[in-house]
Image (cartoon, rainbow, N blue to C red):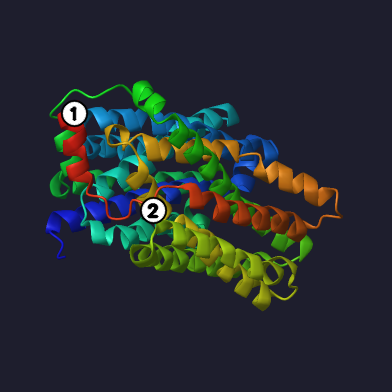
Amino acid sequence: MSWTREQKNVTIAAYLGWTLDAFDFFLTVFVLKDIAAEFGTKIPQVAFAITLTLAMRPIGALIFGRLADKYGRRPTLMVNIACYSVLEALTGFSPNLMTFLVLRALFGIAMGGEWGVGSALTMETIPPKSRGVVSGLLQAGYPSGFLLASIVFGLLFQYVGWRGMFFIGVAPALLVLYIRSSVPESPAFKEMAKRARPSLITTLKHNLGLSIYAIVLMTCFNFFSHGTQDLYPTFLREQHHFDPHTVSIITIVLNLGAIVGGLFFGSLSERIGRRKAITIAALIALPVLPLWAFSTGPVLLAAGAFLMQISVQGAWGVIPVHLNEISPDEVRATFPGLVYQLGNLFAAVNATMQASFAASHDDNYGLAMAAVAGTVAVIIAVMIQFSRERRGVDMTQSAKEVSSVA
C-alpha cells in the first residue's frame, strides 16, 4: 500500500518527537559532574533529578493523553513538544540545585506525554500493514536520542558548558512548526470526536483486566530495558576499569544494536504477529547473557552489548504498535502512554536494587544485571502469550463502531 505525503509527515514528526525528547533527557546524564561542581554538591544529589524526571512521567502521560483524547492528537503534540523544549532551555538558567530539580520534575511531565500522543497519532494514521516497521522506528527514537546527545556532548560541551547544553535542548521547538504546517489530525480521532464518549475512569473500569495486565507487562518491560542499561556504564567503569573513551565506544555500539533490534523485530511482527516477535526477541537475551555480563575484553563486551540490545529493544520495538492495537478506542492517546509510564515508575527501583545486589556480591555488577535481565526475559516471554493479537486492526473503522454505539 502506498503512503500519502501526510502519512509520511506524521511518521517523521512522531519519530523526531521521541528522538528529541530522549535527546533532551540524556543531555543531563552527561553533565551531572559539572552541575554538582557549580552548585557545590555531590553527584548523587544532582542525579536525583533523573529519578524525579522518571517519576513524573506517568503524570504527563495522563495529562497530555487526556488532552489528546479530548482535543486531538495534533494540537496536543505541538503543545507537548513546546513544553519540554522550553523547560529544557529554562534548566540552563537554574541558579541553584532546588530550581534545577523542580525544572527537571516539570520536564518529566512533558516527557511523559510525548510517547503516548505521538504513537497514537501515528498508528491511527499510517497504513495498517506498515505499523510493525513504524513501531520499531518510533521505539528506535529513544536510542537515537541517546546517540544524538552523545555527539552533541562530544562536539560542543567544551565550548558551551553544561548550561549551553540545555540551551541547545530548545531546538526541538522547531518541530512544532513542522507539525503545524505538514501533519494532519488522526482519522480515528475525527471519528471518535463526532459522538460523546465515556470518561477515562468508566472506560478503564470496563477494561480493568486489560489495564492491570498491561501495567504489569510494562513493568517487566521497563525492568528489561533499565536492567540492561542504567548500570551498564558503571559495570564497565567500576568492574572492568575501562577508560571513558572505551566506555563511550561500547555505549555507541550498544545503541546501534538497540536501533537494529527495534527496526528488525518491529518489521518481523508484521509477518509473524506481535506476540511471536516479542517472544523471540525476549528469549534471545538468554543465550547472550554469558557474553554480555561475564566477558572480560572490550571487544567481547561490545559484541554482547550489541546482541543484548537487539533482544531488549527488539522486544520493545513491537510495543508501540501492540499497545495501540489492544487499547480501547476511546482512550488510545491515554492508555498506551499511561500504562507504559506507570510500568516505568514501578521499575524505577531497578538501579538501587541492582546496585545493592552488586555491593553484597563483591561489586559484581555483571551478576546483578544478568539476574534481572534473565528473569524478566522469561517472564515477558510467558506473559505476552496472554495478550490479545490484534495485528492489522482497522483503527478508523473500530472508532466508527465505538462512536456509533456511544
Q: Residue at x 82, y 49 (%)?
A: 359
Crowding at mark 1 (Cα within 10 Å: few <14, some 14-19, many 20+): few
Q: Residue at x 39, y 40 (%)?
A: 336
| Residue 138 spot, x, y in % from top left | 36, 55
Quadrant for residue 7, please give it. bottom left
Quadrant for residue 115, please give it. top left
Residue bearing the label numbered 2: 19
Q: Residue at x 27, y 50 (%)?
A: 123
| Residue 72 spot, x, y in % from top left | 21, 34
Crowding at mark 2 (Cα within 10 Å: few <14, some 14-19, many 20+): many
Question: In the picture shown, does residue 89 fall above or below 30?
Answer: above
Q: Secondary structure at mark 1?
A: helix
Q: Residue at x 50, y 39 (%)?
A: 213
98 or 129: nearer the viewer: 129
Residue bearing the label numbered 1: 405
| Residue 375 spot, x, y in % from top left | 67, 54
Q: Which mark is residue 186?
A: none
Please state which amino acid type lies under the numbered disc 1: Val
Which quadrant is home to the C terminus? top left
Please state which amino acid type lies under the numbered disc 2: Thr
Which quadrant is home to the N terminus? bottom left
Q: How many marks?
A: 2
Alpha carbons under labels 1 and 2: distance apart: 38 Å
In the image, taking residue 178 as reference, residue 304 lies left or right, namely right
Does any portion of residue 251 appear in the rendered image?
Answer: no
Quadrant for residue 83, please give it. top left
Instruction: Between label 1 and label 2, give the one nearer the viewer.
Output: 1
Does any portion of residue 1 appear in the rendered image?
Answer: yes
Q: Earlier in the sequence, mark 1 or mark 2?
A: 2
